[in-house]
Structures are given as C-alpha cells and as structure tokens.
Image (cartoon, grey):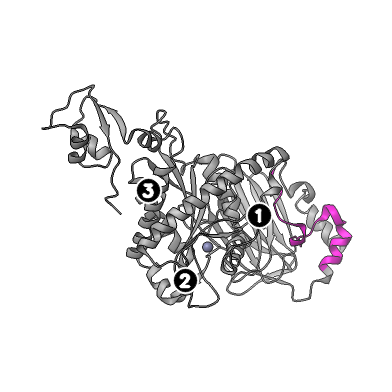
Amino acid sequence: MSREGADMWNSSIGVDPTDARRPAGAPRPRLSPRFHTGYRRGRYGALAAAAVLAAVPVVGNELEGVRIHDAPDSTRVVLSTRDAPSYKILRLANPDRVVIDLFDTHVGRSFKTPVANSRVVGKIRSAYRQRVHYRVVLDLAQSATLEELVLAPIAPYRHRLVIDLYPERVERQDVEPAVRAPEGERDIVVAVDPGHGGEDPGAIGAGRIYEKTVVLAISRQLKRNLDGMAGLRAVMIRTGDYYVPLRGRVQRAQQKFGADYFVSVHADAFRTPRVSGASVYTLSERGASSETARWLAEKENRSDLVGGFGPVSFEDVDDAVARIVVDVSMDSKRNRSIELAETVLRALGRDVKLLRNRVGEAGFAVLKSPVMPSILVETGFLSNPDEARRLGTASYQRRIARAIANGIREYARDHPPAGTLLATMKDHGGVRYVVKRGDSLSVIAARHRISTRQLKARNGIVGDVIHVGQELMVPYAEASDS
Ligand SMILES: [Zn+2]
C-alpha cells in the first residue's frame, strides 16, 4: 500500500487509529511486545507501516476463521490467520462497533462469516476493502471495553488475533448468593477448578477424548459430592466449555467466592502410553520434584498461551507490600497444601490406581495462591488407552470424584478454618442445635445428614418426642457415601 493509500484508509473512516486502538482506562494486554506484529501507526508512522506492508509476500495472509466464545465475564473473538496478522483495530460509536482491518489478507473460498450468537457481539459483518485488505466488523449488543492480543501458533492452532470484550454492565448470574451464616456455622468453601476449556482442549486422548470435557464432568460430580457433605460447599471456577485465564481462576476463587481451598482437576498425557494412574500435586518451592512433574507443569502452564493470556508470573502483579505478605503466608500455606494433597492422595489410593504414592511438587501457575491451600489432581493419563476409556465413563468419573471429595472432607474435619461449622463440630464432637417450631427428629437428622437413630442415641432420646427450645447435640455425619 502506498502512503496515500494508508492515509485514505484512515481518512475514509475519519478516526485517528492511535486513539481508537485502546479505550481510555482499559488495561493493556499482558503479553510481551514480541508477540505483537500488528501495525502501529502511532509508533512507526505511515511510512514505516507502508514499508512493513510492502515486505509482505504478494500472496498475502489468509483469514482462516472467526470464532466467538462467551465466558461469564467476557466475550472472546478469535480471528485465526495463516501468518502473523498485520492489523488495525478501531472503536466506532453510533452504533457501537469494533472494526478490525487485516492488511493484505484474503479469505478462502470456504470462509463464512460466523453468525454472532453472543451476549456482547450482536452481529458480525465482513468484506474486502480496496481488494487486498479484509475488514471484519463486530456490532456490539452492549458497550464493552476491549483487550487485544496476538497469539503465536501452538498446536493445534495457527496464528490468532484475540479480542476480549468486557461488558461494562457485568452480569453476575454465575455468582451464588453469599449466605452469611452465623459465626461457627459457616460452610467451608471449596473452589473446584476444571482445567482448560474453550479454545484450550488440554490433553487429547485416544478416541479424541478431550481433557477439558473429562475434567468438567469429574468436577461436576465432585461439586455434587461436596455439597452433599455437612459443613462443605463447592463453587465451580468454570461451569461450561470456555476458557478462564490461569490467574483469573485463583482470583475468582478468592475474591468472588471467598474460597477456603482450591482444587484444580486435570487429566494429562505423557510421552509414552504406558504411564497411568492418578496423582496429586502442590506448588513446588523451586523446581519440580520429578521429571514427570516438570513436564506436566510445563504443559499445564502453557495452557494460557493456547487459551488466553501470556505466560503467568505471579510477581508481575503484586506490589512490594503484597509480596511481603505472600512470603510470610506462603510457608504455612505450603504445609497446609501438602497435608491436603496427602489426604486426598490417600483417599484416591483406596479407590483408584495411583501413579505414585507420594505427593508431587511442580510449578503450576494455578496453585500460586498465597492464602488458600491449593492442590492439583491429575485424575489419570489420557495417553494410556485403557485409562482414557475409563476416564470417559460416568461410573469412573463418579468414583474418582467421590474419592477426591472424601479426601477433602477428611482434611477439612481435621483442620477446619476457624468460624466454620466443621470447626464447631471438631471442638464439641458435634454441633449444638436448639429445636425450633416445626422440627422433628427426622427433619433435624436429615438436615445434618445423619440417621434419626444416631441423633437419638447421641442425645439419649427414647421415643420421638422433642420440644421447642430443647438443646440437642448433633454428631458428625458418618462417611456413609464413601
Ligand atoms: Zn491439564
């Protein structure tokens, strides 16, 4: 494109692209500049831009596809291209829209503009501009801030230009209402984190079985089990097939849900099909405890490059003060994480084959929470054909979820956080309960997931009569479901 061409391009829209690229106050994408190959008029000027464009081979780039994914807090638009994209993004008002110009780019015969089926993007249009450039327009259904980033190819994906749209009016429909229980009666909140999702399938096993699908199914079962246990309540970090950045997972657990524990659920693949069995990991202080652990950590952390943001480093978000707090709390948290991991590993070992009998340590980004005991469960290896088949069945998913839940409950009962129902039960060998109007022995027993017989035995009650205001001691529910 000539200099006039570049100027005409801009003047035809009548907006200075330098201002339009990123709305005021919007955060910068967390990606190192070397990933950006986009045309930046503000930095290089039109002449330099023209030179960059002139260097592109005659055939130019190809836009291979456009995909849209809704996540609870944002909508992601992915433009995949054969080569690194040279592009410009404009925000235009009335109507609110995002214009993406891909320079020297064509589309294949089979290319179809997708139908927008999203909360944020109302409609997508696309067309050639000056015969050699391709323009994609996103008509927004609601106002949103924008973050852009370019991702280098990583199997199975090519180059991708990613646009994340954050609605200004965030719909918080996935937040469970915060029930403020009285002191001493609150549930322990377990954040269940199904790994991967959306663009990031995780490991892919025999028979095209996807890690992201298997771990979501196991996580749902895990939540069901935990919710059925007295004093425990589970929240899901992702509830469907979409991607949540690794650091966003920990943030969501802590800030949104006030979680006490963090349990990330995965199913991985190794170089050789022979390796099989479940394993449990905690964050290593430095380095990984084994070759397998190092390999897995690399794979899991790379997830952010596939599904979303750049490599995560904990340090780059925390100021000096936060880091001191982290250093102090990290040691005790690490010990608690190891204890939680050991208890879950023992519980797993009673029910399923283990990879090894001790807890592994690795540098998983998702475990870098300074306050919550955090573990990562590798439920098995999709690279092992037998295990992949098992992991795909509902009965095995239920079995492994129940084992993980039993381990969490065991740990929670031994080390309940202060102010929780389980802490009260630990102190008193049960919990005090004052009979209210409308209560019966069977109602109270059912609510605490024990039998009427147990309740009567603990309180020395003969017959079925209780009265309002009477104090009962409700014992622990036994592990009837384990
Ligand atoms: Zn994984």
Q: Residue furthest top?
A: 469
Residue at mark 1: 312
| Magenta highlight range | 26-53
Residue 97 at x, y percent in the picture = 64, 49
Give the residue type at disc 2.
Answer: Leu
Residue 199 placement (x, y as % from top left): 55, 62
* Residue in the picture at 18% in, 39% down: 452
Give how far apart the Cα atoms at labels 3 and 1 are. 30 Å
Direction from residue 455 to residue 309 in the image, left or right? right
Q: Earlier in the sequence, mark 1 or mark 2?
A: 1
SS category of the residue bearing label 2: loop
- The nearer-to-camera label among 3 and 1 is 3
Measure how far apart labels 1 and 2 are at the Cα level.
Answer: 25 Å
Dot 1 amino acid type: Val
Return the residue at label 3: 226
Residue drawn at x 52%, y 78% is 272
Task: Check disc 2 and report the residue beneath it.
Answer: 382
Q: Is residue 18 magenta?
A: no
Residue 367 vertical position relative to residue 269 in the rendered view, above or below:
above
Q: Residue at x 89, y 60 (%)?
A: 47
Identify the disc placed on residue 478.
none
Q: Residue at x 44, y 42 (%)?
A: 415
Crowding at dot 1, Cα within 10 Å, few <14 / some 14-19 / many 20+, comes out as many
Rendered image quadrant of residue 182 = top left
Residues marked 1 and 2 touching at CB (< 8 Å) = no
Q: Position of residue 24 (x, y in %)?
A: 72, 41
Left or right of residue 142, residue 460 in this image: left
